[in-house]
Structures are given as C-alpha cells and as structure tokens.
Image (tube, grey):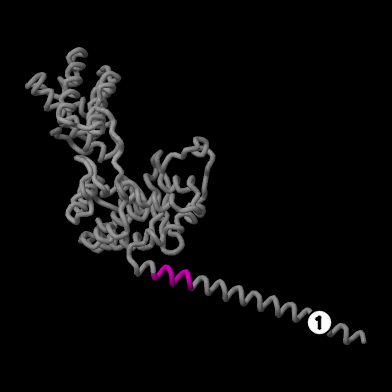
C-alpha cells in the first residue's frame, strides 16, 4: 500500500512522482480509490516486470515496456472477471499517475480492449422506513446528523468535507438554506429540514460542551466522506437493508440511495419545475444556456423544496408539528381575511351613514 501523508503539500517523505499524482486529486474519496488502484498495479508490476521496482522507477519506465505492462495488466483484470467499471477506475488512476509524470502511452488502445459495458443494475432509493431504521440504530450524534443532512438535502456524501457552520442560513419553518461546496466552482444551494437541522444543532452543542471552540468557518463534521460511506455501508448490511444484486452492486446504495430518493421525490411531482429540481441536486442543466442565464432566487428554490418536506420528514412528530403550524397559519390567514372584510364593511357603512346624514341636512 502507498504510504503517504494526507497533506501532500507539506510532506517531505513522499516521492515527487507520487506528490504530483496526489496534487491532481481533489476528493478524499477519489484519492482513496485511486490509491488502492495504483497500489494493485504496482504490486502486479513488481511480480511481472521488476521485483525491485519503486514508484520512481515505474514513473520513468520505457515507452515500449510500459505499454506491454499496461496491456498485460488489463488482460490480468479481465481474466479475473473484473467488470467494466472496475477496470475503468483502475486505468483512470494509472493514467493519472503516468500523465502527471509526463509518461505518454496508447490509452485509446487500452480503452478499446476494456471489458464490455453491461446494462446498469436497477437499484432502488432508500425509503422513509429504511432511513428511520438506520437512525434508530446509530448512537453517534455526528453520524445521525450526517445521515439526516444527506437524506433531507440529496447531497453527495463528499459535501461533508467542505460543509462549514457559516454555510447554513435560516429559512421559514425551521429549515436551513445550505451552500454545498462553498467557494468552489461546483458550489450550489439546497436546503435541509428543521428535523435535520436539529440533529446538526445537537452535534454542534455536544462539541461546544466538550470545550471545543467553534467559529463560523469551522467544519460541521469532523471525519472524511470515506469514513461515513464505510459506516453507512456496514450499517445497511447489518440491518439487512442492502442485498447484493451483483458482485459489486446492491439493491440500495447506502449513501447514494439517499440522493436517489431525494431526486425521485422531486421529479415524480407534476408541480415541480424540472430545471429547479436539477439546481437543488447540483446537476448541470440539460439546457446549456441555463448555466449562464437561469438564475433562480433562493425563494424560488425554497418554494420547490417545500413541496417535498412532508416526504423528507422521518420523525412523525415533526410531521405533526408541521401540520399544526400549517393549520395555525391557515387559521391566522382566515382570521386576517375576516378582520379585513369586517373593516371594509365598517368603512362602507360609515360612507353610507355619511351620505344619509348629508341627505337629511339637505331636506
């Protein structure tokens, strides 16, 4: 396994060829996957090319020998039944390593020989019941908060590594507007429910009570996205929520199934503008000019989000509280309408009385 410092820019131990490789990777999750893929290729190369191989010597391998090694590794993966997706990820990591070290190979040739891409497995989104079951079996306040943020916002799990306290703003009904990937080119806006925010607040209060000094720019969550992904995967397996469909796919993806649920709730409604739904998911829009010209306000996005809050709410007590609040607002609106009508009638009566008085004076 590659031994490296997480903060590669400050590392003195890591070799330059690996430093260049790591500097090209932004996501911690991608880094972990690429690191494993490159390590497996390195072990294969040591057995089949040079048992004294180092990453430095691999980075300077001759063109002809490197091409043969790459092709042999692809044949090895195919022989062992590795899927299209596995081989694709493997060679994305290997290609990045060589490209960052100025080594060029015939990647088109490699791509043409990859395994055939099979039809996608039709996995399902999480349901309110599966999320409730997960929540009931989590002890950690932090992981409960992560689950509820992902479930109520539809965000990818990678957002936790960028999410700061200042990225949450108050909205009506106890909801919060959250900025995802703040200060990054992928930045977008979505929301979390009152229920989710209260879980976040409990976690932040726990940290403050332990003596931690939190500022507006403090990260809300303390661990990597990979940590939460592994935790949720193990939890779903333990609770028998996820069953294998294939060797590498499950009927419900532990993290992405939350995003799929959010997407499904939005896009199965007839009263939701699909372009606004895409914005809430942080997707690139299907109409290219919308990226430059469509500028929905936060209020417009929140109006769309509010339509699925009842389905996003997991605890029935929050749902009941929301219904009571909505009824109180309806009663208040009706009362205001009634008061306004009475006021208008009183004004009309005053005008009529004034006219009658004028008539009496004239007579």
Residue for point 36% across, 50% down = 154
The image quadrant where one finds the N terminus is: top left
In the rendered image, residue 30, in percent from the top left (x then y), is placed at 26, 37
Is 207 covered by the magenta stretch? no
Count of picture labels = 1
| Disc 1 element | helix
Any part of residue 218 in sight:
no
Residue assigned mark 1:
354
Q: Which residues are magenta?
A: 320-327
Residue for point 12% across, 25% down = 44
In the rendered image, residue 246, in percent from the top left (x then y), is placed at 21, 41
In the rendered image, residue 279, in percent from the top left (x then y), is placed at 45, 46
Any part of residue 311 in sight:
yes
Q: Which residue occupies the foreground of this view, 108 or 225?
A: 108
Q: Residue furthest left?
A: 51
Q: Which residue occupies the foreground of this view, 70 or 210?
A: 70
Q: Is residue 360 above or below residue 122?
A: below
In the rendered image, residue 17, in percent from the top left (x then y), is placed at 21, 25
């Amino acid at each position: 396994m590659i031994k490296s410092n997480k903060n590669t820019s400050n590392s003195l131990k890591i070799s330059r060829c690996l430093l260049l490789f790591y500097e090209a990777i932004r996501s911690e999750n991608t880094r972990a996957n690429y690191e494993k893929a490159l390590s497996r290729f390195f072990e294969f190369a040591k057995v089949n090319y040079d048992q004294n191989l180092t990453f430095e010597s691999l980075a300077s391998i001759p063109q002809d020998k490197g091409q043969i090694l790459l092709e042999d590794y692809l044949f090895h993966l195919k022989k062992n039944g590795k899927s299209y997706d596995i081989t694709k990820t493997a060679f994305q990591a290997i290609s990045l390593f060589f490209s960052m070290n100025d080594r060029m190979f015939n990647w088109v040739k490699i791509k043409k020989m990859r395994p055939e891409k099979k039809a996608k497995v039709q996995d399902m989104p999480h349901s309110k019941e599966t999320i409730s079951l997960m929540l009931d079996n989590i002890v950690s306040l932090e992981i409960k908060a992560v689950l509820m943020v992902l479930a109520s916002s539809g965000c990818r799990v990678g957002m936790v590594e960028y999410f700061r306290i200042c990225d949450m703003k108050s909205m009506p009904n106890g909801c919060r507007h959250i900025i995802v990937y703040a200060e990054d080119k992928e930045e977008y806006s979505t929301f979390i429910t009152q229920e989710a925010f209260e879980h976040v607040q409990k976690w932040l209060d726990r940290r403050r009570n332990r003596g931690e000094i939190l500022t507006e720019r403090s990260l809300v969550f303390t661990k990597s996205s990979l940590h939460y992904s592994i935790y949720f995967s193990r939890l779903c397996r333990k609770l028998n929520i996820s069953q294998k469909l294939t060797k590498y796919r499950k009927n419900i993806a532990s993290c992405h199934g939350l995003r799929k649920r959010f997407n499904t709730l939005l896009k199965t409604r007839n009263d939701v503008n699909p372009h606004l739904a895409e914005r809430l998911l942080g997707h690139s829009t299907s109409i290219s000019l919308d990226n430059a010209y469509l500028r929905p306000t936060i209020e417009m996005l929140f109006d769309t989000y509010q339509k699925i809050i009842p389905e996003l709410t997991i605890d029935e007590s929050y749902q009941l509280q929301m219904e009571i609040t909505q009824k109180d607002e309806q009663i208040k609106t009706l009362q205001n309408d009634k008061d306004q009508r009475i006021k208008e009638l009183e004004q009309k009566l005053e005008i009529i009385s004034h006219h009658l008085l004028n008539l009496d004076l004239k007579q």
